Image (tube, coloured by chain):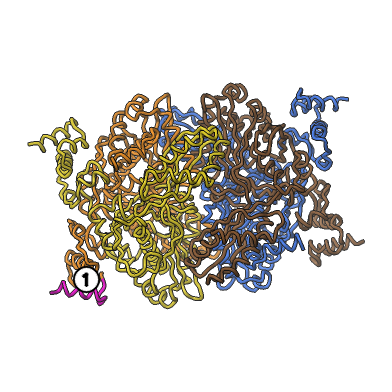
Chain colours: A yellow, B orange, C brown, D blue
Amino acid sequence: MDEEKLIEQLNKGEIKLHEVEDIVNDSGAATEIRRKYLEKKYGMKLEHVSKSSIDFADSINRNIENPVGTIQVPLGCAGEVKINGVNANGLYPILLATTEGRLVAGMSRGINVFNAAGGVNTTIIKDGITRSLILRTKGAKDAVKLIRWVESEEGFNFLSEAFSKSTKHGKLKEIKCYTPGRDVFLRFKAFTGAAMGMNMVTIAAEAAVEELIDKIKEFGIDAVLISESGNMCTDKKPAYINILEGRGVSLIADALIPREVVEREFRVTPEAVAELNKTKNLQGSALAGSHGFNAHVANVLAAMYIAHGQDVAQIVEGAQAMTDVAVVDGDMYVSLFLPSVEVGTFGGGTKRETQQEVLRLLGLYGENDTEGITRLTFAEIVAAACLVSEINLLAIQSAKELAKSHYKLRRG
Amino acid sequence: MDEEKLIEQLNKGEIKLHEVEDIVNDSGAATEIRRKYLEKKYGMKLEHVSKSSIDFADSINRNIENPVGTIQVPLGCAGEVKINGVNANGLYPILLATTEGRLVAGMSRGINVFNAAGGVNTTIIKDGITRSLILRTKGAKDAVKLIRWVESEEGFNFLSEAFSKSTKHGKLKEIKCYTPGRDVFLRFKAFTGAAMGMNMVTIAAEAAVEELIDKIKEFGIDAVLISESGNMCTDKKPAYINILEGRGVSLIADALIPREVVEREFRVTPEAVAELNKTKNLQGSALAGSHGFNAHVANVLAAMYIAHGQDVAQIVEGAQAMTDVAVVDGDMYVSLFLPSVEVGTFGGGTKRETQQEVLRLLGLYGENDTEGITRLTFAEIVAAACLVSEINLLAIQSAKELAKSHYKLRRG
Amino acid sequence: MDEEKLIEQLNKGEIKLHEVEDIVNDSGAATEIRRKYLEKKYGMKLEHVSKSSIDFADSINRNIENPVGTIQVPLGCAGEVKINGVNANGLYPILLATTEGRLVAGMSRGINVFNAAGGVNTTIIKDGITRSLILRTKGAKDAVKLIRWVESEEGFNFLSEAFSKSTKHGKLKEIKCYTPGRDVFLRFKAFTGAAMGMNMVTIAAEAAVEELIDKIKEFGIDAVLISESGNMCTDKKPAYINILEGRGVSLIADALIPREVVEREFRVTPEAVAELNKTKNLQGSALAGSHGFNAHVANVLAAMYIAHGQDVAQIVEGAQAMTDVAVVDGDMYVSLFLPSVEVGTFGGGTKRETQQEVLRLLGLYGENDTEGITRLTFAEIVAAACLVSEINLLAIQSAKELAKSHYKLRRG
Amino acid sequence: MDEEKLIEQLNKGEIKLHEVEDIVNDSGAATEIRRKYLEKKYGMKLEHVSKSSIDFADSINRNIENPVGTIQVPLGCAGEVKINGVNANGLYPILLATTEGRLVAGMSRGINVFNAAGGVNTTIIKDGITRSLILRTKGAKDAVKLIRWVESEEGFNFLSEAFSKSTKHGKLKEIKCYTPGRDVFLRFKAFTGAAMGMNMVTIAAEAAVEELIDKIKEFGIDAVLISESGNMCTDKKPAYINILEGRGVSLIADALIPREVVEREFRVTPEAVAELNKTKNLQGSALAGSHGFNAHVANVLAAMYIAHGQDVAQIVEGAQAMTDVAVVDGDMYVSLFLPSVEVGTFGGGTKRETQQEVLRLLGLYGENDTEGITRLTFAEIVAAACLVSEINLLAIQSAKELAKSHYKLRRG
C-alpha cells in the first residue's frame, strides 16, 4: 500500500517530510502519513493529536507546513464585560484559551466588580503596524541627508505612493528614521485594515525602499538595503520604542470603581491596592530592570491571542504595559496602558476553524472590513480584559490570598 | 428538559457560568451547556469549538474554569535535529503548534544545515525557578539587617528548612535580597523537579517567609508581608534581572558551521550573516531599547510552548535572548544565549491530552522524574530549535529573501 | 571687628550662612567670612580654596549660593583636531579639565591618527532642549482628547504663541504627548539660541501650559498641573527617550581611517578593533543592561563640560552614546552617535571667568549669538573629541595595553 | 629666549605639546609655555586660566598631561547635615562645587528640615569596585566549564591569591561570570581601601586572569584575553547590572519627617510629595525608559564629586538612584537608594590641592586609611546630601514653585 511505503521511505530518509505533500497531493492524507510515520518511529499512538477539524489544505497555504495533527487548548468563558469604548460599546464575552488554572475564574470575579461599577472605558491613542528596514550609506553625512528627505513632505509622499503599489488596503501613515552612523533604520508605520498587517507592511515597505534607493541617487546618495527588518520595528522582542511610539493599537482601559464596590467585592481598601501597585508594579519592576509595569498582562494576552487566532509571539511586546491604581476622592481609579496590542481579525490564524468561530461569536471576523473596525474593537476588548484581570489579581494579592488560593485549588 | 432550562437561566442571569458545574455535577455536560448558551445568545453554532477530546473534569481542577470547548492549533513537524547536549543527546523531532506560515518550513531548512554540520551543542548554565516576595520593615537599617541575616548561612538554612516543609520535590537553591529603602524583595530560587514550579515556589516561599517574620522578631525587626510577588521574580514581564540572574533554565546553544556548508546550503557567506547579526540584532535592538538581541526567538518559543503544554505567557521573558554570529577561521560560529527557559514536563498544561502525547513522543513526559532530567532535556531541545530558526532567518534575510518568500507563498 | 563677630555668630548658629551676604553687602567679603568660619570651626586653613579670581558678586546671582572659595581643576590641551562638520570646520584645540591621568595623553595620540586620516566628520541630526510637564485629567478619554488637540496644528500654534510670550530667543519646535492613563506628559522641545536653555524652556513651557489649562476648559476638559518636570524630559537621568527623540544636540561624528594609518599608528588591525567594539561595546553593554554602547564617552564629556562651563550633571544622558567600528574595503570606518549633547555657550557656567576664557579661545563664547551657531559648533567639537578618545581607547585595549599603560605610568 | 623659541616651535609644529615637558624639565614652566603658545596662536590672554595653586609636577604624574592652566569652579557651603549612619555620625558640612544656581540654596533649605527631623539615616548595603574582563573560549561548553571552576571555592581562592600579588590594599571579594556563548565576562569585585580603586582592580584582575589562562589549560580549556574591560563592570555608562549587583558603595539614606515639620517647613502635605514622587519619579521615569527613578541626584553628585576630587564621569552610574516617599502614620518617610557611589578619599583627584583641603576639612583625607573608613564615611555623606536635595526639590515642585523660583531669581 502507498501509505505504508511512504512511511517506510520517510523512515529511511529517502523522502523528506515536506515531500509527502507533493507525492500524495492531498493535504489531509499527507498529514496522516506524517503522523503515522512519527507514531511508528516513536512506537506510540498520537490518538488525541490525530483528532482535528482543521482543513489542512487551506492551512498549509497560510499557517503551517508539514502538519501532523492538532493541539487542543481548553477554551473557557469568563462572562461578559461591559465596555464603554470607541468602537466597543456594550457587553462582550471574554473567551480564554489557557491551561493556567484560576485565570478564567479570576477574570470572572473581576468582571462582576467592573460591571457593578459601570464597566471599563477604553480609549485608543494610536494605530499602525510597523516595520523597520536598514539602508546602509557611505557615512553619517549621507545618512542624515537621506533622513531629511525621507522625513520631508516630498519624501513621505514619494514613499507613500510607492508603498501603495504593493497593497490594496494598506496605507502608509508615518516614517521615522534613526541612525547610529552610516546605517539608516526607516520605521514604516501603516494602517492595514482588518489584518494585523506584518506581511503587508513588510512587502510594501521593501518595495518602497527599492524605489527610494533609485530616487536618492539623484541626490548623490548611494544606499543598499541591509535588512528587511532591523529590530527597530520591534516585533516579538521587548523594546522601549514600542512603548514610546506604539505598535499596532496603543490604547488605555480605565475605570473609576466606587469605594463601597471595592470594599464589598474585593474585601480590600482602594488604598491597599494602590500601595501594592506602587510597590510591586512600579518599584519592583523598576528595580528588576523591567519594561512591564504590570502584574500579569501576558497571561490574558496569551489566552486571548490563542483563542482568537492571533500571532501569539506578539504577547512579548504586548506585555510592556503599565497598570495604575490611585485613590481619587476615596474611590479607586484604575488604568492600564497597553502600547502594543498587535491584533488582526482577518488573515493569519484567524482563518482557522475554531479561532474564526470565536471571532464570529464576537461579531468581529474581519472579512470585508477595510476600515479595520473589527480589529480596533477587538483590541479594545483585549485591553478591557487585561485591566479587569490585573485589578482582580492586585486585589487578591493585597488581601494576601494568592498562594493560598492556588494551594486550596491544587491540594485541597 | 434540564439543559434547556439551565441555558435559559444563564440567559436571564439567574445563574452564573461557574454555577453550572455544581448543578449538573458533570464537567463535560456543563461544558456543553455553557457552549450552547453562548450559541443561543449569539445566534451561531460553535461547531468546531465543540469538537474536543479534552477531559474537562480533569481540566477544571488544574487548567481552566467555565470551559465551553476547545481551540485547535495546527501542529507541524520540522524534522529531527541532532543535539549534543548535557541531557539531550541524539536526534529529537521538533514539533511546532503555530499559525505562522513558514515557521515550520524555515526550521526544516535550518535543521538540514545544522545536522550537516554535526548538530547543535547545548550547555546549561543554571537552573531554578524564582519568586520574589516583599517584606516591609520600618526603615533601611532594619531592611539591611534583615538582608544580612537572610543571606548568611544561618539564615539560608533556616529558610531552606522552612521552605521544604511545603514541598516534596522543591528545594531552595538561593535567596537574593534587594532593597530600595524599607522594603526587602526576597528572590527565592528553587529546584522543582520535573515541574516548571511557579506554584510550588510561591507556596513554599510564602510559608518560609511567614516563619521568617516570626524569627526576625528575635533581632528586633518587625516586618510584614506586602506581596507574594514583588515583580523581581520576574514572571511574564521582560526584565534584566532574568538576563543577569537567570530564571528557569539558563542555557546556550551553539555550533560551528563549516564555511562550505554555509555557502552551499544558505547561499550566503559567514561574513554576511555576521554583519547582519551585528547591525540588526545588536545595534538595531540597542537603539530600540530592546532586551531581545535576537531575530525571532519568541516565534519558536510560542510554537513549542503551545505544542508541549507550557505556560505560554512565559515566552515574554524567554524572548530576552542573545544571538551571536562570528567568523572563526573562515567558518561560522553561531550561538544563542537563553537566560529564561521556564519549562516543565509535568503539571500545568502538560497534563492535557494532545500536549502530553507530544511530550511522550519525545520520551519526556515527566511523571516520576524527581530529578527534573526530562525538564532539562526539553529545555535543551527548545534552545537548539531556537538557534536553528534564528540562524536560518538571519541567513534568509542576509540573502534579502524574507519579504519575497512571504510574497510568493501568499500570492503566487 | 565685624568679621570676627560674624564668624562668632555663625559659630553660635545665631545667623545662617546665607545671611552673611545681606549683612556685609559685599559678596567677596561674605565669601571670606564664611570660609574663615569653616576654617575656625574645623581648625584648618583652606589655603588653596581661598585662591580665586572668581567674581562672587556675579556668581551668586547665577551660579552659587553661600560661596566659600574655589575648586581648581587642572586644564590640559590635547592638541588640535581637524573637523569637517556643519558649523565646525578646521582645526580646534581640545581642552580638558580633569584629574584622570592618561585622558589628555590618549586624546593627543588619537588626534594625531584622526588628523592623519583627514579629520573627523560631524553631522547634526536634531537640536532642541526639552521639558516635560504633567497635566492630570479625569481619565484616559479626556487625556487622549487633550493630546489630540495639543498635537493638532491649532494646538501647536496656540502653545507656540503662548510659549513665545515668556522668552525672547526661545522658540517652540515640537510637543510630544505621552499618557499611561489620566496623566498627560507634554514634552516641549525648543530652540534656545546660544543657551543650553533648561531654565528658558521650563519657564516658557509652564506659562504656556497655564494658558492651555484655561483653553481646554472650552472643550470640557478640566486639567491641573502636577509637575513642571515629569522625568520624561529626561534631564540628568539615563533614559531611552533621549536616545530615540534626542535632547539638546543629537549628532554623529565619523571617519574613515585608512588601514595603513590604523596599523602604523595604533599598531592593530581594523578587524581587531571592530571585533573588540562588537564584543565589549555592543554585547557587553547589552548583557549589562546598559544604555551606553561605548567605552568611555563620559570621561571626555566630563572633562569638556567642566572646562567650558557646562552643566556637568548632563553627562549622565550624554553618556548614552553608541560607538561603531566596521571594516570597509579594508579600511576602518568609525562612528559615534551622541543623542544628547546638551551644551550652551552663553548663560549658566559659561559666565565664569576661566570657563569663559576657554570658550573665547575657541571663538565660541555665545554673547549676541541668537542663532545658536556657537552652541552647535561646540557640540560638534565635543562629538569629535569623544570619537577620537573612544577609538584611541579601543585601539589600546585591542592591543591589550590598557592596564599596563596605567601600571607603568603609576608605578614605573 | 628659550620660552619664545619653544612657543615658535610649537606654532610651527616642530615639537609637540607633550615634548615641552622633557625639554624644559620643569612642569610649571612647561605649563606656562603651552599656555602662552595657545594665547599667541588664538590672540588672547588666558588671564584667569593662568591663576593656579596647582603643583603641576605632581599633577602630570597622576592627573593630567599637557597642562595649560586651571579651571576654577565656585565652591559653596550648604550648611551642616546631621547624619546617623554606619561610619558617619554627627554633623557634616556639605560643600558643593557647581555653577548651577539654587543648588546650594535648595540643599540649605533641605538640611534645615532634615536636621529638624533628627537628621538623615544612612545604611550601607555593599561595597566593592568592579572590573569585568573578557575571556574567549572555543565555545559554550568550555565557557561554562570555565565559569564553574572560577565560581567554585577552589577557583575563587586561586584568583584571590593571584589578585593579591599585584596590590597591597586591594582584596578580591567576589567574582561573577556571565556568558552569551563562547566569551566569558568575569566581573571582579574588590575592596580597595581608601581608594576608589579602578586602577588597582584593573591591574590586579588582569594579572589574575593571566594566571587563570595558564591554569585552565590543565582542564583542557584554551582561552585568550579579549579585553581588560568588557563593559559589564559597568564603568561610566548607565547599566542595570550596577543597580542589581552594586558598584562602589551601595547604600540607602532615609528619614522619617514628622508631618508638622513637612507642613511647616515645606508648606506641603506628605501626601502631595508622595503623589508627585510616584507620578514623576516612578511613572515618568518608567515611561521614559529611564534607569534613574529620582529627580536630580546627578546634580548633587556632580557638585560633590568636583569638590572632593572624585572621578566626575562616575556620576553616570551614580545617577541610577531610586527615591521613595511614603506616608507612614501621617508622617513622611523618605528614602534614596544609591547602588553605585564610587568614591575614594585617597589617590586620583583627591591629591589635588583644593580638593584635598575640602576632604581634610571633613577629616576624611584617606592617607593611611587601609580600612577604607574615610571612603565609606564620605559615601554616606554623599548619600545623605542627595536625599536632602531630592526631597527639597520634590517638595518645591509639589508646591509648584520650581520655575517661579528660578524666574524670580534670574529676572526679578
Mark 1 lies on residue: B20
User: Residue A296: x and y, percent?
Assistant: 39, 59
Secondary element at tag 1: helix
Q: Residue furthest right?
A: C1
Say if B32 sits above or below A131 in the image: below
Which quarter of the rendered picture does the C terminus of chain B lie within? top left
Q: Quadrant of residue B393?
A: top left
Badge 1 amino acid: Val
Residue B375 within the segment the image draws in magenta:
no
Magenta residues, as a range? B1-16
* C50 or C138: nearer the viewer: C138
User: Residue B91: x and y, percent?
Assistant: 25, 35
Residue B90 seen anywhere in this rendered image of the structure = yes
Mark 1, Cα crowd under 10 Å, few <14 / some 14-19 / many 20+, is many
Which residue lies at the image location 71% right of the left edge and 37% below the top edge? D63
User: Residue A124: x and y, percent?
Assistant: 43, 61
Instruction: State left or right for residue C276 relative to residue A396.
Output: right
